[in-house]
Image: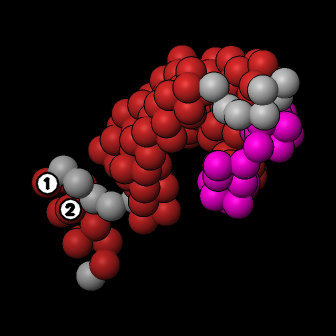
Amino acid sequence: MPRKLVEFAHEIGNILYVGGILSHIVIGVLFANAAPDTMVTVYTYKLQSAYILILPGLTLKILCDLVLFFFCRERAWWMRIKFLAAAVLATNAFVFLVPMMPELLALAEASVPSGHLNPEFVTLEHKEMFIGQLNVIPLLVELTMGAFKPPISGSERRAARAASL
């Protein structure tokens, strides 16, 4: 597979993943402290967009990085750091955040008859927000490494200097 095609597919993964995350942030801000019936709609959207945008985008990004590493022999340190950041993002997504979505949706649905969000929903929603915020640093690291591909080791810096002469 040509490297340019892999890099293009990686950009599509970035768009899906980051776009999905940004849409979660926007809908969360717009409907913070909403009524339970509105929160049912919000968490239905968040759950579906996680399945349609975020998880496929993250998976595509990781698969493209694996192709670059194993088939295109991209072994620079920026790629290794990118893998570490992607591992943190994948763990947070697949182990913590996405499994919370059906539970949050169920708690919102259970709150509709009373007209008030139950404390269990509020507690879990705060946990979801906290874990989501933890993704900021690894996401910025992962995107920065992929965009700038900085020479990190001494041999990489020497090679970069020699190439620029």
Q: Which residue is mark 1?
A: 154
User: Crowding at label 2, few (<14), some or many (≥20) Cα neighbours within 10 Å?
Assistant: few
- Find the distance from the CA under tag 2 to the CA under tag 1: 5 Å
x, y percentage for residue 15? 71, 55
Q: Say if 152 sits above or below 40 in the image.
A: below
Q: Are marks 2 and 1 in contact (CB under 8 Å)?
A: yes
x, y percentage for residue 42? 79, 42
Q: Main secondary structure of the magenta part?
A: helix
Q: Which quadrant: the C terminus?
A: bottom left
Q: Which quadrant holds residue 77?
A: top left
Q: Secondary structure at mark 1?
A: helix
Q: Secondary structure at mark 2?
A: helix
Q: Residue at x 20, y 62 (%)?
A: 157
Amino acid bearing label 1 = Gly
In this picture, residue 6 sits left or right of residue 69: right
Q: Which residues are magenta?
A: 25-49
Q: How is the image coloured?
A: secondary structure
Q: Residue at x 49, y 62 (%)?
A: 147
Q: Say if 19 sits above or below 162 in the image.
A: above
x, y percentage for residue 14? 65, 52
Q: Which residue is mark 2?
A: 157
Q: Residue at x 37, y 50 (%)?
A: 137
Amino acid bearing label 2 = Arg
